[in-house]
Structure formats: C-alpha cells, structure tokens
Image: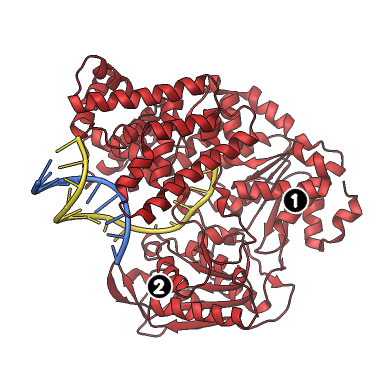
Chain colours: A red, B yellow, C blue
Amino acid sequence: MKTQSQLLKGLNPEQRRAVLTTDGPVLVLAGAGTGKTRVITIRTVHLMNEGTAPENILLVTFTNKAAREMRERLSKLCGDKSKEVMCGTFHSFCIRLIREHHEKLGLPKSFGICDSSDQLSAIKAQLRELRIAETSVNPRAAQSRISLYKNSLMLPEDAFKEAEDDYDIIIARCYEKYQEYLRRSRVLDFDDFLLYTHELLRDNEDVRTQLEKQFKYVMIDEYQDTNTPQYEIIRAIVKNHRNICVVGDDDQSIYGWRGADIRKILGFEKDFPGAKKVYLGTNYRSTQEIIDAANMIIKNNSSRHEKELRSAYGPGESVAILRVEDEMHEASHICGDIRHQVSREQAHYRDFAILCRTAQQPRAFESELRSANIPYKLVGGQSFFDRKEVRDILSYLRVIDNPADETSFLRIVNTPPRGIGKSTVDKALAKATEQGAGAYAVFKDMHKENELPSAATKGFGKLSEALRTAYTSVQANDDLVSTLRKLVTDIAYHEEVARCYPDPDTAQVRWATVDELLNFAENYQRKNETADLNGFLQELMLEESDKDDDDNSNAVTLMTLHAAKGLEFRNVYLVGVEEGILPHKRSAVEGTIEEERRLMYVGVTRAQRLLLMTFCTARAKFGKLQGCHPSRFLFEMKGRTPPDDWVPASEV
DNA sequence: CAAAACTGCCTTTTT
DNA sequence: GGCAGTTTTG
C-alpha cells in the first residue's frame, strides 16, 4: 500500500481535490483525457488509507472492460486489499442482488438472459399473437419504445395510462404481453436487472439498509451514461450517508438513444444539494490544436456544464480537413497516407484509427485496407453473439438449462432441418396458447400421442434425445466441455455448417466460430471449479467477448465513434463528416443534434497528435449515388458559416 | 418440407 | 448493396 504523499505526488491540484474530497456528494467533471480512471482508483486507495475497509467501497462502471481496468489499477496500487473492493458493472451488481433475494421478487432461483435479438423475436411473436401486422407496427420501433418505458420505470399499466392514440395502446399491449412472456419463460432482459433491483430496494427497507451499511462510499464511473433506474438504485443505497462520488463528462454522453439520461449529470447538484463540484480540465492526451478544435465544436451545445479543456502538451500540427470525391477515394487516400507514414518509419499501424459514425462505413475501408495489405482490426460491429452459429449452439444450451425458454426452443426445433416445418410448429404453438403450456412441453406431448407428421416424429425424437442426454450430463455435473462437444456431434452441427456453406473456405470460417465458443467454455471451466451451465450462460451474456484484446497486435483500428469512447490513438482519421452521417439524418428529425455534436467531440478528442477529417462530395447510399455536404460541425470548428448552397441533414 | 426467387428494410450498441 | 424474412416453386 502506498503512503499518502506517494499517492498524491503525481496529481495536479484539481485531481488532488477530487481525491481528497471524500465525504458527501461529489461531482467530478472529467473532460476527455484528464486522468479520470487515475482519480477514481487513487481516491479509492485514499479512502482505505483514511481507515475505510475495502469491502465498504462500491465502485460501479458501465462496461466489464472498465471494471477490469479499474481492478488492475487498484491491484497495482494496493495489492491484495483491492480484491475486497466491490467493483463491477451495474448489471453484474444487480444480478447478484436479484439472485440473493429472488424469492422477495417472486422470481425463480435461476433464470436465463434475453439479449436484444431474443427480445426482438419475442416482441415479434407478441405482435403476431395480437394480430398486428408488422407493416403497421415496426417490431424494432416497439422494442425501443418498450425499452424506453422500462428505462423510465414505467410498467405496462403506466404505458396504458400515458397512451395518446391507438398506436400507443398497441405498444402498451405488446409491452404487457412481452412482460408476461418473459416471466413465463423464466427469462430476464437487460432492463429487468435494473428494474427488479430498483423494486427490491424500494419495497424492502431491510435490504436497503443493509446495503447502505455495507457500502459506506459509492463511486460511479461514466455518470453521464446513467439512466433513471440506475440513478434510483444508487440514490437508495446512499440515501442517508450521501457519500456518493460520480465521475463523468456531460460532453461525452452519447448513449441517450438507449436510455442514458444526460440530465442526471447536469442536475447532480440539484439532486444532491450541497454537492461539491470538481472540474478536471487539463488534458494529457492531445495537442492544443486538437483541443481547440474540440472546444470550438462542443461550445455550440446549450445544455452542458460550462467548461473548457486545455492541453498539457502545447501546440502541434494543425487539424486537417480533406474533401474527397466519394467513399472509395476517401478509403484509398487514407490507406495511402497510412502506408506512407509507416514506410517512412514515422509510425506503426497500431498508432492509427479510422473512426466513423455508422456501422456500414467500414466496408469501403475494409476492402481498401485488404488490397493495400494493411493489417487492421474491426472493433465492434456484429458481435460474436449475433453470429448464427453462436446463437444456434447457445439456444441449445439455454433450452437445456431452462426448458421454458421458448425463443430458444423455437430457434432450435428445426435447426438443423429435421422435418419440423412451419405448419407443424404453428399447430404446436396454437395448442400451447390454448393449454397455457410451453411449446417444448406441447411438442413432447404431441410426440408421445403420435400427433406429429412422420418426418417430424423422427426428427423430434432425435432432438429430444440429444437434449435429454445433455441434460442428464449437466445434472450429473459432468465436465461442461465434453457435454458441449457431445451435443454438437449429436445434432450433427458440423454437417449442417458444411451444408449451409458449400464453399469449403466459408464453411471453415463459420466452423471456427463454434470452436471459439468451445474455447470460451474451456476457459470458463478452468476459471471456475464448479462450472455449471447456468453460470456459464450468464457469464457469456454479461461478459463482452474479450477476444480482440490483442493490444500488442500491430494493426490499424477501424471502428464506430461509439466504440471509440475511452480510447486514444496517435493518429485519427474521422471519416464521413457529412450532413446526414454526422450529424446523422435521423437526429435532425428526433431533435438529437446535440448528441451528434458530442459524438463528433468524442471523435476529435481521441487523437493524440494528428487528426484528419474527411467528407465526400458524393457517396453511394442504399446503392444509389447521392450528393453530400460537409458537416455543420466542420464549419463550427472553423468558426465559419455554411455557404448558401449548403444543405443541412434535415433535407438530405 | 426445403431450396430458390423475391421483397423490403436500412444509426449508433453494451449490459 | 446486402441481409433477413417471405413467398413461390420443386
């Protein structure tokens, strides 16, 4: 453990103030690159130095990655003591509480997790049952509305009360049915973790008091991303002692579209009267040119804490803007630039990042990077769990773990194809609704009573045998990996992959995904002595796949702005800085231009030394070539007004 | 019931 | 332009 003076030595006065202000509510406004993580970890150690036991400190983050990083840094500062600090994501914290108090919430002791694509198919199923055509209600729109309701702590009944038209009523009905479905299937979605925890603390004063007694000091990272349920949970825990320290940057709030509420960080001093405010404004990442550009842009936002970043490094190269013909030229210019710099030994591939607004933009870059033979890694994009193979195998495991999980059952019932077609499934589903039973149970019944078509009889027999074998083996606490291997063989999944992808190379790539999943299981088994299936599934869903953590690989990073938050690169290319892309077309309609501006701000502040922004004069959109106009943010940055022939995003 | 042809959609993404 | 979901065909 470091001593007090050692701890504080490397800190600037503002950081020191953030560390030393320990009691009561504290708001730390930590601009980009101002040493936020450092402040949180040192503050934690400082609390311990002052006599607070590590287990009395709660450190909440949003991502597992952030939690891990925090843990590592803490461990360097104070060794084994760091292990006793409660440090994790909101969701992992909530899941622990829900498991411990499940009976108070009327929940089963173990439950599955419904991710957003399961959520979408569940919602589609509810719409079908309500006989609502997908043409009149977009399932994705319903999904985000339901999630927004949950994020506002609104139950289905509240949604009914607030409904203003028929559409709202349909959504409310869908929400109601969706919740019934989740309960029936013994599954929780991500929002539910927060909602149930909130309910737990609201209705059980004993639990709340116990938590408040345990967590004498609470810190929250990335407070600008907090949503209402998270806020209420924390508020309940610190209700009396009010030792809450939140760290964040309102200028980097970019998750409003999924419920994060910037008003929480803007209104902290009102929510917690007497709060002390500390502003970290010294940026240790970028040159003054880059910081100036960022400041010029962000000051156009009206709802924010007044502040201005300054660079600790001083001047550097000027920020460049480049106009290119189209996205192909954009890609080839940047690739040429990277090659040029690397060949003159001015930089390594890993020093470069290409940042873009949308997930389809990387496409043009991928092909160009490949043909230029530049190593690159695409971060984010379609997640590991969205790949067909993973979803298939996982669905099998989820049915084995929880036979009530209907979404998963319906997915696997005819995957690989085993003669159980749509008509058979529909018949079973109708029966299931009628009897109020689960689809799997109904299928078993129909199989026993010989009510299935002959092909389906055979197919279902094989399926249920494979499931039963795996189930028995799980119950007997057999080795998880061998159970998994056996299952994959039993359902002839390798053959299925070969059948779906006649091209051997593609089949190979697809099968590699299954291998990767098996690796996950092996790792999990090694880490956990009691490697049970339910635990494995929960860890899988909760832990983002940390496979691309090969930081030492020397490759150019290609990613979206959302994925880039928290990272830094020597050279950054911010591409497609056009009206309609950044700001995105939809933001004009939805009135979220300020969030787009923050996205731009996040992008700019990723750069340490060199920043180049590009915009196209035309670009292929949905297969059609369309003219483009430079983003308003570029004009803001230069302090200029757009010319007369300029067209804003709302008219693109 | 499964493969082939066809249609319509299309921000961002972690837990 | 590309994918997923649906309809048509074998």
Q: Nearer the viewer, residue A602 or A24?
A: A602
Amino acid type of the residue that numbered disc 1 sits on in the rendered structure: Arg
Residue annotated with mark 2: A579
Q: Residue furthest top?
A: A449
Specify the quadrant that holds the C terminus of chain A: bottom left
Figure disc tally: 2
Picture coordinates of residue A2, whole percent (x, y): 88, 49
Picture coordinates of residue A61, whole percent (x, y): 63, 46
Name above or below for residue A116 compared with residue A321: above
Disc 1 crowd rating (10 Å Cα; few below 14, some 14-19, many 20+) is: some
Q: Nearer the viewer, residue A612 or A489?
A: A489
Name above or below for residue A53 compared with residue A466: below
A9 left or right of A30 in image? right
Q: CA distance from mark 2 to mark 1?
A: 41 Å
**Residue A176 appears anywhere in the view:** no
Q: Nearer the viewer, residue A250 or A568?
A: A568
Which mark, by number, is residue A352?
none
Picture coordinates of residue A33, whole percent (x, y): 68, 64
Residue at the image point whose x is 42% and y is 82% from the top:
A324
Picture coordinates of residue A513, whole percent (x, y): 45, 47
Residue at the image point whose x is 64% and y is 83% from the top:
A317
Amino acid type of the residue that numbered disc 2 sits on in the rendered structure: Glu
Disc 2 crowd rating (10 Å Cα; few below 14, some 14-19, many 20+) is: many
Using the image, name the chain to which the residue with label 2 belongs: A
Residue annotated with mark 1: A73
Do the CB atoms of the residues marked 2 and 1 lie less than 8 Å apart?
no
Residue at the image point whose x is 64% and y is 25% from the top:
A207
C4 left or right of A350 in image? left
- Tag 2 secondary structure: loop
- Tag 1 secondary structure: helix
